[in-house]
């Protein structure tokens, strides 16, 4: 039941946390907001924002590792491919007891269905890019992105937050 509730909440996040516009300046503002949130919590993360394959924002906070950048690449590839959050993709695969390799013939060297990458959508254009975090447990990576988007859009995070923690896998 928790899995279905999480997927319903992620559907709400993805359909309602839509930007009115997106460009390099918006990417910078969102990235800085995300970095400030992570830094205020001493979160050892790497953050990246991409639009149409072009990196617009990237930073690494103390305690993050080069491996986090590799997870960013793989999670972002998943979100860019499916236009869904990498966490939603992972939860759907968990529901069906499948993997990206089995279901879509995608290499785990290039794709990861673990939380932390979220689709950026513009109300007049649809999917335009990804915002991705790596360094915390996957659910927390996902929630950090959602919280930053809520702040950026002036939305109440408690209306979009996932309920209780699910796992502690750090990727």
Image (spheres, grey):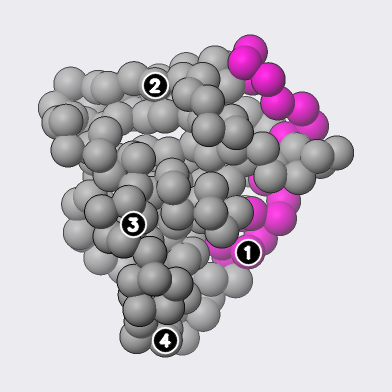
Earlier-in-chain disc, 2 versus 4? 2
- Disc 2 to disc 4, C-alpha distance: 34 Å
Residue behind mark 2: 58
Name the mark on residue 112: 3
Q: Does the residue at mark 3 contact the one at mark 2 (Cβ under 8 Å)?
A: no
Of 143 and 125, which appears nearest the observer?
A: 125
Residue behind mark 1: 11
- Disc 4 to disc 1, C-alpha distance: 18 Å
Kind of element beneath mark 1: helix
Q: What x and y, as percent, mark residue 51?
A: 59, 30
> Within the magenta stretch, is there residue 31?
no
* Image position of 167 (left or right of 82): left
- Disc 1 to disc 3, C-alpha distance: 19 Å
Q: What x and y, as percent, mark residue 59?
A: 34, 20
Magenta residues span: 9-26
Name the mark on residue 50: none
Q: Which residue is drawn at 35% across and 78% down?
A: 102
Residue behind mark 4: 96
Kind of element beneath mark 2: strand
- Disc 4 to disc 3, C-alpha distance: 16 Å
Question: Mark 1 Cα within 10 Å, few/some/many (few <14, many 20+)?
Answer: some
Q: Residue at x 72, y 51 (%)?
A: 16
- Disc 2 to disc 1, C-alpha distance: 26 Å
Question: Mark 2 Cα within 10 Å, few/some/many (few <14, many 20+)?
Answer: some
Question: Mark 4 Cα within 10 Å, few/some/many (few <14, many 20+)?
Answer: few
Closer mark to the observer between disc 2 and disc 1:
2
Q: Does the residue at mark 4 contact the one at mark 3 (Cβ under 8 Å)?
A: no
Earlier-in-chain disc, 4 versus 3? 4
Q: Does the residue at mark 1 contact the one at mark 3 (Cβ under 8 Å)?
A: no
Q: Residue at x 85, y 39 (%)?
A: 124
Closer mark to the observer between disc 3 and disc 2:
3
Q: What x and y, as percent, mark residue 88?
A: 49, 64
């Amino acid at each position: 039941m928790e899995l279905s509730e999480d997927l319903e909440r992620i559907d709400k996040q993805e359909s309602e946390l839509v930007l009115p516009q997106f460009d390099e300046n918006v990417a910078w503002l969102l990235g800085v907001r995300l970095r400030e949130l992570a830094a205020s919590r001493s979160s050892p993360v790497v953050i990246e924002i991409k639009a149409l394959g072009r990196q617009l924002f990237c930073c690494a906070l103390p305690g993050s590792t080069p491996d986090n950048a590799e997870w960013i690449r793989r999670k972002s590839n998943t979100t860019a491919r499916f236009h869904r959050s990498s966490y939603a993709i992972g939860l759907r695969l968990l529901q069906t007891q499948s993997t990206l390799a089995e279901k879509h013939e995608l290499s785990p060297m290039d794709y990861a269905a673990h939380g932390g990458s979220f689709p950026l959508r513009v109300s007049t254009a649809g999917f335009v890019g990804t915002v991705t975090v790596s360094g915390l447990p996957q659910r927390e990576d996902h929630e950090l992105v959602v919280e930053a988007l809520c702040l950026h859009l002036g939305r109440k995070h408690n209306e979009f937050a996932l309920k209780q923690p699910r796992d502690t896998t750090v990727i």
